[in-house]
Image: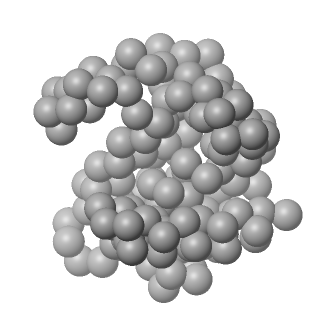
Amino acid sequence: MPSINFFEEQVKFKLQHPRKTSHWIRAALKKEKKKLVELNIIFCSDEYLREINTQYLNHSTYTDIVTFDTGDGFGGIEGDIYISIDRVRENAVKYLSEFDDELHRVIIHGVLHLSGYSDKSNREKAAMRKREDAYLSLRN
């Protein structure tokens, strides 16, 4: 059975509405015409994510998200999304956003990466942001 799992690493954090969030992610994947296999969302500290970023991506910088596609290449969505709760909190203040809005933006950003979207160029970033905004509007 396809699943969405939430975990914590080196941070005390509980997602407020995990079922609602899972339903929202599933709705976004359905609109993207993607089949869910398994998705793990790991909420962690800045230091934990920086260590992952350094070890696996050779970037020794802080970031809000790192996404790993663990699928077999046959089209199903399977992956791990690591999210720094520290960085999300900081970005919410920086961008004058509510914490939950910023958190959901980062979650859907990772889901979109697993769905095949990239954000390397300015054009890709704009397309990604447009999709994020569209899916954020579906939360309620």
Q: Position of residue 115 (x, y in %)?
A: 40, 71
Image-quadrant location for residue 18: top right
- Left-right relation of 95 to 17: left
* Quadrant housing the C terminus: bottom right
Q: Residue at x 40, y 34 (%)?
A: 63
Q: Position of residue 84 (x, y in %)?
A: 49, 29
Q: Does residue 83 sit above or below 35 in this rendering?
A: above
78 or 140: nearer the eye? 140
126 or 140: nearer the eye? 126
Kindly give the residue lying farthest to the right in the view shown: 140
Q: Does residue 80 sit above or below 74 in this rendering?
A: above
- Left-right relation of 29 to 61: right
Q: Is residue 121 visible?
A: yes
Q: Residue at x 54, y 16 (%)?
A: 11
- Left-right relation of 59 to 19: left
Q: How is the image coloured?
A: one colour
Image-quadrant location for residue 103: top right
Q: Position of residue 53 (x, y in %)?
A: 26, 31
32 or 121: nearer the eye? 121
Q: Position of residue 117 (x, y in %)?
A: 37, 70
Q: Does residue 125 sit above or below 7 in this rendering?
A: below
Q: Residue at x 23, y 77 (%)?
A: 74
Q: Is residue 114 visible?
A: no
- Left-right relation of 109 to 94: left
